[in-house]
Image (cartoon, coloured by chain):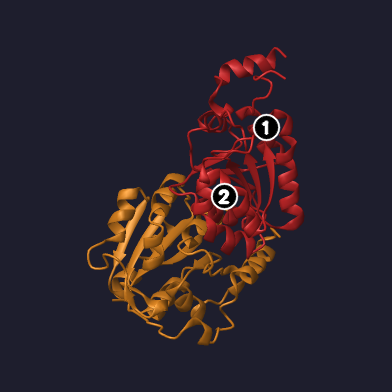
Chain colours: A orange, B red
Amino acid sequence: MINNDDLMAEIKKFRGKAIAIPTMTGSRGWLDSSEQPSRDVSVGGAMGKASNFAMGLALAQPDTKVVCFDGDGSLNMNLGTMMTIAGAKPKNLIHFVLNNGYFSVTGGQPIAAADEANFSQMAAGAGYAASYEFDNIEDFAGKVEEIFTAEGPIFVHIHSVPEIQNEPIGRRTRDPRNRSTNDAIKDLRKELGTL
Amino acid sequence: MTEQQAMLSPLTILDKIKENNVTHVIYLPDSETNHLFIAMEEDPNIEVITVGREAETMAIAAGVIVGGKIPVCLVQNTGMMESGDSIRGLGLDCNLPIVMIIGYRGWTRWGITPDSAARLTEPTLNAWGIQYYLVEHDGDADRITLAFQTAAATQKPVAVLVGDEYHGFNRMNLDEERKIIKEG
């Protein structure tokens, strides 16, 4: 199992000017460590669609690396995205899934087939250019440079430590770093000069 | 007006897509759009992206817009209904001018509409507060440009309902149609 903070620390070393599109559990881990918030868009509003958004961005900005941090529950909602991405072949897209087996932000209910399904095999079968799977940080640290330099679309299946939230959304305090998707999109469009 | 003149040609749709500088057409096929697909695939200036489910189209379009290019989503009305959370969460809440060309399955112009897909299309768009334009034949095609202009002005999703009740997209062979256009 890989701790989110350790994972993000390794990724940050190779981020460069990459745009990051986290969602759900991936948002918490990434936004805690990102040093370029104007290049981060947490897509929480359209459930399961962060990877589609990241793919569209990657196609429109082919010279910029785009990294999506999907959740296992999110990806399970929209498994067809794997074939859409494989078909569109965005060379600059890296699609992570942080798989902890649970709907972490809703109290820790298990996702369907959490013990049976294998996302990295699905991605390989869908036709990603490459698909990786890691369950310890040492192995990941040894491959992260390759992941960031290879031609995509790349899929990375991370077995991550569950970080369960069990407080109703209305009672949670919003981390100021976790801006609304609308505000984050505005900032990114300013950054890219596309507003 | 003859039936042929009243058609909505796939080439007319394509011309309007190009006129509005669309770079990416994101779509899921339905039984009425095959000739449009063929025409788009033959055009080197348009990237055609096929998805597995309609709700993906709006999320991809959102990313394309943020990346500085111009998308259009092409789905059927049944797919539009499936796409509610994408339209809401990205298009409406994030103020993105996503133009959706929507096949108006089941639509009739005489008011008796057995198909619930058609009956619920406009009420759904109205509930979402999404402006829409009806396009029935080539003479209405400028409304597609109007849809792009409205989306740009409002920074909101806008729909074009393709209400060709005879499913004209597939009624004529593309080569025959090009020949007719060429010969005036």
Q: Residues within 10 Å of mark 1 (few under 14, many from 20)?
A: some
Residue A135: percent from left, percent from top: 27, 71
Task: Please state the chain letter of the residue tagged with numbered disc 2 in the rendered image.
Answer: B
| Of A164 and B169, the residue lying toward us | B169
The image's mark for residue B15 is 1
In the picture shown, does residue B3 fall above or below A137?
A: above
Residue B30: percent from left, percent from top: 48, 37
Residue B118: percent from left, percent from top: 56, 43
Q: Does residue B76 appear in this view?
A: no
> Which amino acid type corresponds to the residue marked 1 in the rendered image?
Asp
Secondary structure beneath dot 1 equals: helix
Q: Quadrant of the N terminus of chain A?
A: bottom left
| Of A5 and A75, the residue lying toward us | A75
| Of B90 and A20, the residue lying toward us | B90
Secondary structure beneath dot 2 equals: helix
Residue A26: percent from left, percent from top: 44, 72
Residue A21 lies left or right of residue A124; in this view the side is: right
Residue that carries the numbered disc 2 in the rendered image = B120
Image quadrant where residue B155 sits: bottom right
Q: Residue lying farthest front?
A: B112
Q: Does residue A55 appear in this view?
A: yes
Q: Which residue sits at x=66%, y=15%?
A: B180
